[in-house]
């Protein structure tokens, strides 16, 4: 999968892993555990350093879809990756 334009600002040794959680692929308890929210649709982005242990992310960003919004994977990814990049 090609990098998105907002991920191009990351140094070459950092990689992004994005997970979209929704009622079809996880339980409500998993959404609360990983997304830390009561939203039905949650996107989680984790940034890993190739030079370090892959089990510990360097930064994490979470985007939760409001009940009033319609879910969008692109927008969720953009928000979650942006929040993770802000932690760097």
Image: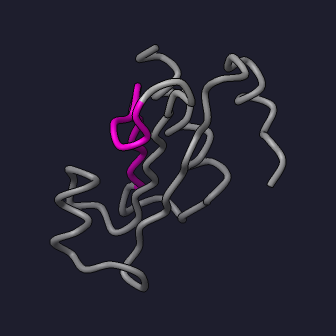
Q: Is residue 9 magenta?
A: no
Image: 38 above or below 29: above
Relative image position of residue 35 (x, y in whole percent): 28, 53
The one of 73 and 13 positioned closer to us in this rendering: 13
Relative image position of residue 65 (x, y in whole percent): 42, 55
The one of 64 and 84 positioned closer to us in this rendering: 84
Image: 79 above or below 83: below
Relative image position of residue 7 (x, y in whole percent): 71, 30
Residue farthest to the bottom? 24
Residue at 61% in and 27% down: 14
Residue at 78% in and 39% down: 4
Residue at 36% in and 63% down: 67
Left or right: residue 77 versus residue 68 is right
Q: Is residue 64 magenta?
A: yes
From the image, which quarter does the N terminus lie in? Answer: bottom right
Left or right: residue 74 versus residue 77 is right
Residue at 52% in and 22% down: 85
Colour treatment of the image: one colour
Left or right: residue 47 versus residue 29 is right
Image: 18 above or below 54: below
- Count of marks, rendered view: 0
Quadrant location of residue 66? bottom left
The span shown in magenta is 53-65
Relative image position of residue 72 (x, y in whole percent): 61, 60
């Amino acid at each position: 999968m090609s990098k998105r334009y907002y991920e191009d600002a990351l140094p070459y040794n950092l990689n992004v892993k994005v997970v979209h959680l929704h009622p079809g692929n996880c339980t409500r308890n998993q959404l609360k555990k990983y997304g830390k929210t009561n939203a039905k649709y949650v996107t989680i982005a984790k940034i890993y350093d190739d030079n370090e242990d892959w089990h510990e992310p360097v930064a994490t960003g979470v985007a939760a879809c409001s009940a009033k919004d319609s879910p969008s994977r692109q927008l969720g990814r953009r928000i979650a990756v942006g929040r993770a990049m802000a932690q760097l």
